[in-house]
Amino acid sequence: MKQAVDLPGLSKAEVVSFLETIGEPAYRGRQVFAGLQHRRLRSFDEMSDLPTQLRARLNEVARASTLTIESRYVSSDGTRRYLMKTHDNLPVETVFIPEERRDTICFSSQSGCPLQCTFCLTAQLGLLRSLTPAEIVEQIIIALNDAYGVGVKPPRGTNLVAMGAGEPFLNLDALLQALRVMADKDGLFIVPNRVTVSTAGVVPKIRELAKVPERPHLAISLAAPTDELRNELMPINKKWPLAELLSACKDFERTLKPGERFTFEYVMLAGVNDSPEQARQLANLLNRHSLRAKVNLIPHNPAEPLPYRPSSEDTVEEFKSILESKGIHTYVRRPRGRDIFAACGQLAARHSTLLEPQTIGA
Ligand code: SF4
């Protein structure tokens, strides 16, 4: 028997041609695509505009959803964290962050992660597997349905960040396919300009992304101003050290649109990478490569058993002012959802035992 096709990961044209392979006219394909992506329905049985026989046929040859929601946690600041499961029972985590003018959904590109960043809990899972385009798209559908109701248009714009579990550049083809699906104006209509992909520094893929015409924004997780320290915190640096990484960033910079910058993320670890000297080293590093970038300082989110503490507010402010005095645009990222372990580096922190979900299912 042929394997069922996961329709949430297909573009409108691909859904249309899939429907044609089972003898249906193009308009039925467009209806199914709208049902999945615009009405955000999670089963063919809910698509009441389709004939009953077609719904039954689709149930035999395709899937309208593959992820299930295992738990949902709601923070006192409105952040929602979801633990989902794939059909083969692997964890997928997604975070919905409401803000005044927009919502941000932080999604995962892999279940677990093969990279070994020492400040990140996901690293401890190792790589379970890369997610499919459908599994990436479904995370967004599930979060929007939960926040606003099935198919209800969000009152604000939706930004996406590929900063959940996994290294997106190790699953770039699936990610770009998911972004093409989500950009469709007859579907979710979240265009690549609203998406940021964060990498630990897979250099060849930075150059590959630079060539994609409709591409998302880029963020690089830096975490250290020297190779010596970065080798320790982010072992991927041994493969692609800072000089190579920043030279790829320089090439990427040539493709930026007017006014666009890319971002360096810098997690602040007390006594490890947060001294005034390290701030000067970081500023000098970026200035040496004359990069049109901004720096986001991310207070570390403590998560046992990781051996780090967050830098104090004063230390973060001093670090920021040193960078700014050297002409680097710097922002301090406010931690969100710490109480539900939804903040950066905390995913995979609490799967079942330590936190009771406030609500189960969505
Ligand atoms: S920080 Fe990102 S790249 Fe590094 S281990 Fe965690 S999920 Fe993987």
Image (cartoon, rainbow, N blue to C red):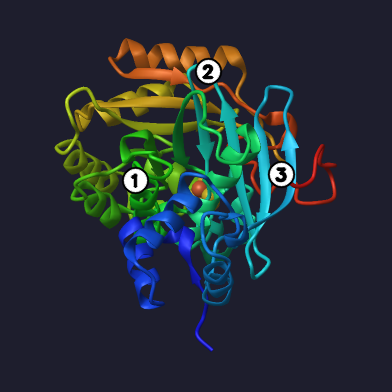
Comparing labels 3 and 2, the label whose residue is closer to the camera? 3
The crowding category of the residue bearing disc 2, from other C-alpha atoms within 10 Å (few below 14, some 14 to 19, many at least 20), is: many
Q: Residue at x 24, y 41 (%)?
A: 249
Along the line of sight, the residue nearer the viewer: 54 or 91? 54
Mark 2 residue type? Val
Task: For ligand 1, tell me if the residue under mark 3 lies within 8 Å.
Answer: no
Q: Residue at x 60, y 46 (%)?
A: 142
Mark 1 residue type? Asp
Label 1 belongs to which residue?
184
Q: Position of residue 24 (x, y in %)?
A: 39, 71
Q: Position of residue 38 (x, y in %)?
A: 46, 44
Mark 3 residue type? Ala
Instruction: Measure how far apart labels 1 and 3 are at the Cα level.
Output: 25 Å
- In the image, residue 344 sits, relative to residue 28, either above or below, namely above
- In the image, residue 323 sits, relative to residue 174, either above or below, namely above
Report helix, strand or loop for mark 1.
loop
Label 3 belongs to which residue?
362
Of all residues shown, which one is farthest toward the bottom? 1
Label 2 belongs to which residue?
316
Q: Left or right: where does residue 63 sit relative to residue 328?
A: right
The C terminus lies in quadrant: top right
Q: Left or right: where does residue 321 sit relative to residue 326?
A: right
Along the line of sight, the residue nearer the viewer: 173 or 60? 60
